[in-house]
Amino acid sequence: MKEFYDKTKERLIRYAKIDTQSKNGTDAVPTTAKQFDLARVLYEEMKQIGMDNVWLDEEKCVVYGTVEANMEGALPVGYIAHMDTAPDASGTDVKPWVLENYDGSDIVLNKEKNIIMKTEEFPNLLNYIGQDLILTDGTTLLGGDDKASIAAIMTMCEYVVKHPEIRHGLISIAYTPDEEVGGLARDLDLVRFRSPVAYTLDGDWLGYYEDETFNASHARIEISGISVHTGTAKGIMKNAADIGVEFMSKLPAFEKPQYTDGREGFYHLVSFNGTCEECELQMIIRDHSLEQFEIREEYLRKITDHLNGKYGAGTVRLTLTEQYRSMKQVIDTVPYMIDYLKQAITDCGIEPKSLAFRGGTDGSALSHRGLPCPNLSAGYENAHGRFEYVPIQSMEKNVEILLRLNELYASAGNK
């Protein structure tokens, strides 16, 4: 529908120009104050649209709103997207532009700096021949992750409010900060949100959905050594850095991200900092299978115990911190959520496809907090980098999918 095309296009371009990059390594909430710049824009826009219960949490930087039910008995549904962009590439002074009717050739993003997006390097471009792409000038990311989702959700809400003849249940909306740095929507108030179920919109490739993510933990390994002069070190020195290397040598050589795909789990060394006296390793552990994930955690404990037996109690200290758990354990208890999602995608002329996501979403954490929350992809491509782009037709289609989901939830409650 041309209205959806025009509205999502205008919104994404406008939102993309607002720098909302989040930041790792800080305890600030949100991690960057500039995320409030978009939050306040969305707050005002939701009020202008005519949404209900619009509220901005001035402490946690979460924006809420609803479209109240206009019929009795309809099932409620919610939609969640994040406002921040990734720290991986600059989000300052984003210059979005539109390439209409893409012809399948390489795209010159920045003639002056000779920045070219080549189909040889980005073959997914060829899936969008004939479509209209919102791109960057090659010096920043675009922010379609996740502002393309916000554009689609806002356009859907505006359409529903303008068309009271469309019968629907409660539609709950929330926009959250810091997803890109592990925020996991921790400050989303489930009571204020109201809907008992929701969908996040975040991911590549229009029509894909995720109801399964990794189980994830962070491991911190601290090692204490004994440093003495190398000339008199025999029988005394205990080299913490060497023990760190020994720890890593006991991990399976090919169970690393660069050697795994699909449902295969891994250990990933994030950082290694060591001297003879002290050494610290930071690792992440991932697996789709909860049973295999727990075996991985236990294996790290066994390595720790072995090295302490060899070098003395307390030499190696392991701290495991839960990051998130797979949403699948929760989503499987509400199968209608996936049934409706697949039907909505199909009814909008797209073949639904599912991936066991090799990562986590805000929905992973929200599901285990009591809000079942599978993920619908937003349709952006090449996220987190200078070659990111969003087909306008993908946002347009996502509006249609959301409207169809609303209809399915409304009719389901009145069967």
Image (cartoon, grey):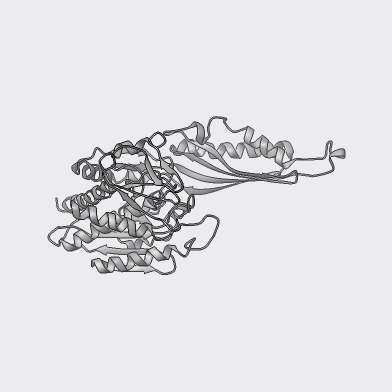
User: Quick check: 15 above or below 258?
Assistant: below
Residue 77 visible in the snapshot: no
User: Quick check: 406 above or below 108?
Assistant: below
Residue 151: percent from left, percent from top: 30, 56
Left or right, residue 168 beside residue 358: left
Instruction: Tell me what residue is drawn at x 33 percent, y 67 percent.
Output: 43
Residue 246: percent from left, percent from top: 67, 35
Q: Looking at the picture, tell me which residue is in the foreground, 94 or 197.
A: 94
Total residue callouts: 0
Instruction: Tell me what residue is drawn at x 33 percent, y 47 percent.
Output: 390
Residue 190 visible in the snapshot: yes
Q: Looking at the picture, tell me which residue is in the foreground, 24 or 342.
A: 24
Residue 95: percent from left, percent from top: 39, 55
Farthest residue, direction left:
165
User: Quick check: 215 above or below 71?
Assistant: above
Residue 343: percent from left, percent from top: 21, 42
Farthest residue, direction right:
232
Quarter of the rendering containing residue 54: bottom left
Left or right, residue 252 beside residue 119: right
